Amino acid sequence: MQVTDSIRNTINKLPVSYVFTYRDFNPEVNGREAIIKALNRMVAKGEIAKLSKGKYYKPKETSFGLVPPDQYQVVKDLLGRGDNVVGYLTGYSVYTKLGLTTQVSNTIQIGRNETRPAMQRGMYKISFVNQRNTITEENIPLLQILDAIRFIKKIPDTTINDACKRLFEIVNSLSENDQKQMIRLAKKYPPFVRALLGAMLESLMSDKAVEPLANSLNPITKYKIGVSINRLPNATKWNIQ
């Protein structure tokens, strides 16, 4: 069987929009250069699409044209290393998932324990947010919420008050164990994040539970977030303006 036929058979078994590289086709057997040439010939024929250098996908075609792969597929190699989680989706795509905005962005943001320069993949700009907590599969949803609080002023197509209302609903929907875990994770976030989280949790948990957040804050520091007192009645207590 020719290299191209072998590759085509493998691709036919892949899900639509799955992003792959030459490594998915056993380069030790067929040779890296032969595989890359075959893939590029298939791109030229319109059988597959190219996301960026060395990255291809099986496109879904609609009456409006080719549908790009979902954001996870675009950056999955930046989120894990073998069985280890090294990053997670955050920012704009998560704001939409959490119901904080309806605006769709071509920027994909990734939380990682290291700082990396931004990059471009196809239509997407990929930027990185430094995460000081250890990243695990279990705490990623909580980190995403904390990130949304951290960047509340940058959530597009909404107001601070509306974003605060939605974030309170999200925090309120969490289990008590998750709320306690958020308090622990928030210790590695900026003070205004701890203040805003504390103000949200104060009406949901005991004073003792939120005490670590209050004790971590400088009592004379003011946090200019722009939340209305009508939206967050205890904002003054937490020095939120």
Image (cartoon, rainbow, N blue to C red):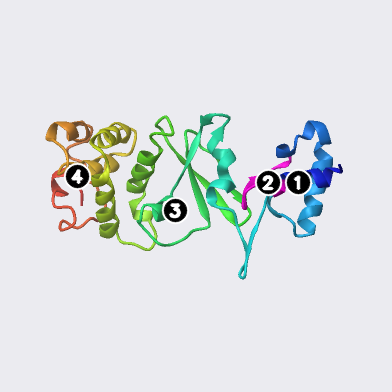
Rate crowding at label 3 as few (under 14), some (14 to 19) or many (20 or more) other CA atoms within 10 Å.
many
Mark toward the viewer: 3 or 1 = 1
Q: Is residue 17 magenta?
A: yes
> Circle 3 sits in a helix, a strand or a loop, which is it?
helix
Q: Nearer the viewer, residue 57 or 145?
A: 57
In screen coordinates, is 76 left or right of 129?
A: right
Magenta-tinted stretch: 11-22
In screen coordinates, is 166 left or right of 32?
A: left
Evaluate if marks 3 and 1 touch, with contact meaning CB atoms under 8 Å apart.
no
In the picture of the structure, the residue carrying the numbered disc 1 is 9
What separation in Å lies between label 3 and label 1 (alpha carbons)?
36 Å
In percent of width and height, residue 131 lies at 43, 36
Who's the residue at 57% across and 47% down the image? 73
Evaluate if marks 1 and 2 touch, with contact meaning CB atoms under 8 Å apart.
yes
What separation in Å lies between label 2 and label 3 (alpha carbons)?
31 Å
> Circle 4 sits in a helix, a strand or a loop, which is it?
helix
Sooner in the amino-acid sequence: mark 2 or mark 4: 2
What separation in Å lies between label 2 and label 4 (alpha carbons)?
51 Å
Who's the residue at 27% across and 59% down the image? 162
Evaluate if marks 4 and 1 touch, with contact meaning CB atoms under 8 Å apart.
no
In percent of width and height, residue 34 lies at 84, 41
Disc ID at residue 92: 3
In percent of width and height, residue 26 lies at 75, 34
Q: Quadrant of residue 161?
A: bottom left
Sooner in the amino-acid sequence: mark 3 or mark 1: 1
Sooner in the amino-acid sequence: mark 4 or mark 1: 1
Mark toward the viewer: 2 or 4 = 2
Disc ID at residue 199: 4
